Amino acid sequence: MRKALKSFVALAAAGFALSVLPDAGFACGTRHFYNNSNMSWYLHFDKSTCSLPNGPNVSDCTVPPGSVAEIHYANPIGGGDRIGMNSQGFDVNIVSCHIDHPNQGNTGNVALNEPANGHVTTCGRGWACK
């Protein structure tokens, strides 16, 4: 009887711990795509989602010029992710919230991990890519 009670208490504690963990994206939290350019940017995520103000979380977003979209990274237990921005693709390490350029080349008119890991900022409107 004692062993059964201990098992029950252990399962209840584990269940409570899982219930208080935040939803998907808890490792990175919410990040942003800052579109400072004069053109729309199309974003596609394999596992994660994006959203525009007052919009749903979806895997595909079109971010209008001068707008900001939220990036909601997937649960890190699922592994990495990939983000497509217009015609470029980048790898995302969801555990460290770091976006990597697969061939380490020029990223064009975007700054990855700017202003912090997991964020993306486009050039324009007074903001120059570094």
Image: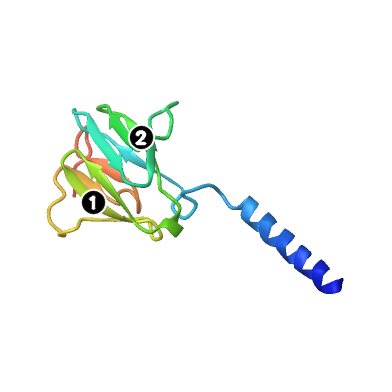
Query: In the rendered view, would you say 8 is above or below 40?
Result: below
Which residue appears at 28% of the width and 30% of the height? 62
- Give the structural element (helix, strand or loop) at label 2: strand
Query: In the rendered view, would you say 69 is above or below 94?
Result: above
The colour style of the image is: rainbow
Report if the CB atoms under discs 2 and 1 are less than 8 Å apart.
Answer: no
Label placed on residue 39: none
Label placed on residue 69: 2
Could you say where residue 122 lies in the image, as x and y percent from the top left? 23, 40
Which residue appears at 18% of the width and 50% of the height? 130
Amino acid type of the residue tagged 2 in the rendering: Ala
Q: Residue furthest right?
A: 1
Left or right: 8 with respect to 17? right
Left or right: 62 with respect to 79? left
Tally the numbered discs: 2
C-alpha separation, residue under disc 2 versus residue under disc 1: 17 Å
- Give the structural element (helix, strand or loop) at label 1: strand
Which residue appears at 34% of the width and 57% of the height? 80
The residue identified by callout 1 is 90
Front residue (pair 82, 128): 82
Query: In the rendered view, would you say 90 is above or below 58?
Result: below
Amino acid type of the residue tagged 1 in the rendering: Phe
Which residue appears at 82% of the width and 67% of the height? 5
Tag in front: 2 or 1 = 1
| Circle nearer the N terminus (2, 1) | 2
Could you say where residue 84 lies in the image, as x and y percent from the top left? 24, 44
- The crowding category of the residue bearing disc 1, from other C-alpha atoms within 10 Å (few below 14, some 14 to 19, many at least 20), is some
Front residue (pair 36, 7): 7
